[in-house]
Structures are given as structure tokens and as C-alpha cells.
Image (cartoon, rainbow, N blue to C red):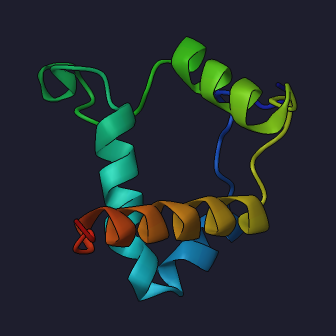
């Protein structure tokens, strides 16, 4: 990492892409809270950011080891769209 950012760091363009899509705000918030370590609010600064090792693992498994650069906007938006669809599908009534 050239700038000391954790693996899988989301750059400004990706954050703006999510900000421009209100339907992705809840999936993004759920993802941040799921990836946050337990008790994150007790540590200073109280930010729900995952450990570098966990973020590297998640990016490695999702992208096949390309954790040496920030995630681009398309990857972030596509993943959050997928999370949104899965959440909607899990709430859909099932045929019995």
C-alpha cells in the first residue's frame, strides 16, 4: 500500500458513487456495521472500521488477491447492489 491505507480502502470516487445512490445507503451502513469489530465504540477514535487483516482477507477472497489498490467505484456499487438484492430476496415470501 503506497499511502498507508488499509487493504480494500474505498476511495473518494467510490464513496461519491454510493452517496449518489440513496438505495445503497442502507446496504452500505449494514456492511460497515457487520465488518466492524465488536466493541468498536469503546476504542478511540470510535469508528466502525475493520482491522487491516480482516479487510485484507475480505478483499483477497472477493477480488482474488488484488488488495494492493483501493476498490474502484464500480466494484463497490456492484457489491452493494448485490447485498441489496440479497436482502430483498431474503424478505420475500417463500412458496411452501
Q: Tell me: residue 73, above or below residue 40.
A: below
Q: Is residue 64 left or right of residue 35?
A: right
**Residue 22 in sight from this viewpoint:** yes
| Image location (x, y in percent) of residue 51 | 47, 18
Q: Is residue 51 left or right of residue 1?
A: left
Q: How many marks?
A: 0
Q: Quadrant of the C terminus?
A: bottom left
Q: Quadrant of residue 78?
A: bottom right
Q: Is residue 84 left or right of residue 62?
A: left
The residue depicted at 68 percent of the width and 37 percent of the height is 8
| Image location (x, y in percent) of residue 94 | 26, 68
| Image location (x, y in percent) of residue 12 | 66, 63
Q: Quadrant of the N terminus?
A: top right
**Residue 48 in sight from this viewpoint:** no
Residue in front for this viewpoint, 58 or 39: 58
Q: Quadrant of residue 53?
A: top right
Q: Tell me: residue 73, above or below residue 66.
A: below
Q: Is residue 29 left or right of residue 57?
A: left
Residue in front for this viewpoint, 94 or 81: 94
Amino acid at each position: 500500500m503506497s499511502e498507508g491505507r488499509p487493504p480494500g480502502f474505498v476511495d473518494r470516487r467510490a464513496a461519491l458513487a454510493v452517496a449518489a445512490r440513496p438505495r445503497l445507503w442502507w446496504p452500505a451502513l449494514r456492511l460497515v456495521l457487520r465488518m466492524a469489530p465488536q466493541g468498536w465504540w469503546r476504542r478511540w477514535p470510535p469508528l466502525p472500521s475493520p482491522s487491516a487483516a480482516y479487510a485484507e482477507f475480505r478483499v483477497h477472497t472477493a477480488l482474488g488477491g488484488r488488495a494492493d489498490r483501493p476498490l474502484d467505484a464500480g466494484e463497490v456499487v456492484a457489491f452493494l447492489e448485490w447485498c441489496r438484492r440479497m436482502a430483498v430476496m431474503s424478505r420475500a415470501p417463500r412458496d411452501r
